[in-house]
Image: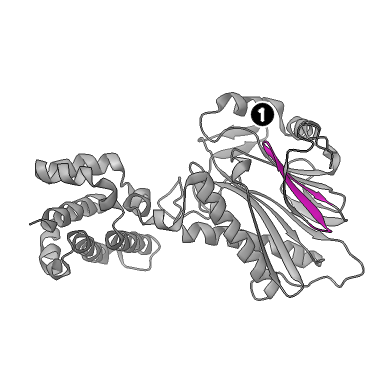
Amino acid sequence: MTVPLHPASGDVLYRSALFEARRFGRYLAVELLAPHRVISTSAVGGGQRDDVRFLVNHQSCEGQGDQERYDLVARMGLDAYHHTVCVEIGIDPDRTALMGTAANMAYAVHRSAAFEDLRVDAFTTAGVSGNAARAGDPAAWVETDDGWRKVSPYAGTINTILLLACPLTPSAHARASITMTEAKSAALAELAVPSRYAPVIATGTGTDQFCLAAPLDPSRKPKDSTSPHVKLGEIIGVAVKESVKEALCWQNGLEPSRTRDLFHALGRFGLTPARAAERLAALLPERRYGLLEKNWNAVFHDPGSAAAAHAFAAVLDRVAFGTLPPGLANEVLRQQAACLACSLAAKPESWPAFRAELALASDDPVELVLRAIALGWNAKWS
């Protein structure tokens, strides 16, 4: 691979007889060393092709506030952007599948998985801080005959380069894109990543991209299936899910223990640090609130309280999705709020008293949670 900007300083992430993956500066590039069939979301030359040689993930701007770079790329247009990036790193634009992102390439993650003679490699960058969405959420853009019109701002992208070490039938190749997408969504579900557009768990972002490559080797029988029911589908899911989760840890600080934060569990319903501080200062005696303020992280990361908060969120989801009748919501939410108060107070025996007191609380879910926090914290030292 010819890399004029960084001829020797790049990191070789992985090298095999089929490909070499190298990271340098704002780029992660995979050179295919043998013929491959590639399906990609590349804006230029995307779709299914058999003549692609390079798969590139490029950081085009910073994740937040980089309006100058954003405007520059927007003015440039997709064709010129594609050509410029390829020229910068000395590769053929006509044989390149390109993805752009605001994620830092230093946080790119390589994960592989194997079973017997099967192997897959996933290279992922991921950010969800401003653009996480669930399929069917209100959209940020509309395409018109005159071009694209922005409805709302966004920031965030999950980009994955997935390489399989075995040939695939055309249908299995297409199915692999579904399996990798399901794996990405599973990662977001495990981390309880909220949509930025509706009070639901996200399934991806509005700008996710991928490159999926499998070798064209006429000497080998192509695999017929990449579904989760077969081992090849399983290892695709493992490699992609693990790479997405670790990339989100590096880019956004998201990792499982952090998701016990009550603001993470209930932020999509309106629980914010500012609202919590304002209401708890009003609900608690001054001395008790001052103590809570000094122990803020311990309070809002308390494992038992987090369990109740996630259960509270699950009830709200089930009501919204029609699993539970709306008329039952207030009763069940008060039960979970009482559990939260018990956990924070470290007094499980007080559940009946807490439940009785919370019967008088507002029906607003966030207000109910804040009253449960105040109730539990006040009782902890009583």
Which span is picked out in magenta?
A: 16-32
What residue is at 48 percent from the left and 60 percent from the top? 189
What residue is at 11 percent from the left and 56 percent from the top? 381
In the foreground, 235 or 168: 235
What residue is at 10 percent from the left and 65 percent from the top? 353
Q: Position of residue 237 (x, y in %)?
A: 62, 65
Classify residue 323 by image quadrant: bottom left
In the rendered structure, the answer to whether residue 228 lies left or right of residue 54 reads left
In the foreground, 239 or 310: 239
Disc 1 packing (10 Å; few <14; some 14–19; many ≥20): some
Question: Which residue ends up furthest to the front in the rendered image?
Answer: 8
Q: Which amino acid, by three-letter code, is at mark 1?
A: Val
Vertical relation: 212 (above or below) 118: above
Colour scheme in the image?
Answer: one colour
Q: Position of residue 225 (x, y in %)?
A: 73, 72
Classify residue 319 by image quadrant: bottom left
In the rendered structure, the answer to whether residue 29 lies left or right of residue 73 reads right
Residue denoted by label 1 = 73
In the rendered structure, the answer to whether residue 277 lies left or right of residue 167 reads left
Classify residue 73 by image quadrant: top right
Location of the N terminus by quadrant is top right
In the rendered structure, the answer to whether residue 100 lies left or right of residue 49 reads left
In the foreground, 183 or 358: 183
Query: What predominant SS class does the magenta segment belong to?
Result: strand
- Tell me the element at label 1: helix
Residue 69 located within the stretch drawn in magenta: no
Q: Where is residue 173 in the image (x, y as percent from the top left)?
A: 76, 63
